[in-house]
Amino acid sequence: MLGAGRALLDLILPPLDAAGAPALTGGLPADHWSRIAFLEDPVCDGCGAPWEYDPGPGVRCAACTARPRAFDRARAACLYDEHSRDLVLKLKHADRTDLAPVLARWLLRAARPLLETAEVIVPVPLHRWRLLSRRYNQVAEMARPLGALAGLPVAPDALARIRRTESQGGKSAGGRRRNVAGAFAVPPGRQDRIAGRRVLLVDDVLTTGATAHACARALKAAGAEAVDLAVIAKVRAGADTTI
């Protein structure tokens, strides 16, 4: 009955795509597909950056080798540029939660090697005051359909942002690390969801990796066996970090 009602509602008021037109391709206009710089193998196992050639499985780029992060592996669905930015910001700030299932399918494709070993999906949390003002966590909105697609449990409350942080936009890599240091923790009574498990941490954009690093440290402190990272978009090395 619910499915029939939703189908009727979509017929009367069809869902809109990212450009505000009736959606015919799951929320993304057909001409957007050719503009998105989707990332394909081979990629760096540590940050998901694309390789120009295939160096072999598990190889990491110079940046990941020089500064290892607390998360073990990472994959991104696409590069963060003027085309993908619009989708991310619409989900994040424009109440376009209808885009979340579309982006979850992108994550399913990009993070397939990580999902094969994951046991629980954990979204990067918002601080409670930011959640109150925004009304939803855009990352959790993506994590739920991803969990349904992958057949994995999603634990949106297994990780908490215990300290309100400034925006990461415009900060240097060091400034980003200092801003989120100690900002995350697994709340008391929820360690059993994490301890001994392989966690897939989900976020929207990977810039320097500071936020994911801080989250992974908190998850491992609570006993996580491993923490991998899946994001919608990755900022190209050397690109502007005002986001």
Image (tube, grey):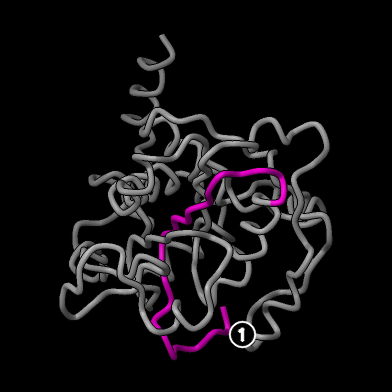
Residue at 28% across, 49% down: 109
- Which quarter shows the N terminus? top left
Of 140 and 25, which appears nearest the observer? Answer: 140
Magenta residues span: 221-243
Q: Position of residue 179 (x, y in %)?
A: 75, 75
State the residue lying farthest toward the top: 1
Q: Is residue 92 magenta?
A: no
Q: Which residue is mark 1?
A: 173
219 sits to left or right of 132 = left
Of 145 and 93, which appears nearest the observer? Answer: 145
Snapshot quadrant of residue 101: top left
Q: Position of residue 47 (x, y in %)?
A: 42, 69
Q: Position of residue 45 (x, y in %)?
A: 35, 65
Q: Position of residue 59 (x, y in %)?
A: 30, 70
Q: Callout 1: helix, strand or loop?
A: helix
45 sits to left or right of 131 = left
43 sits to left or right of 121 = left
Q: Is residue 233 magenta?
A: yes
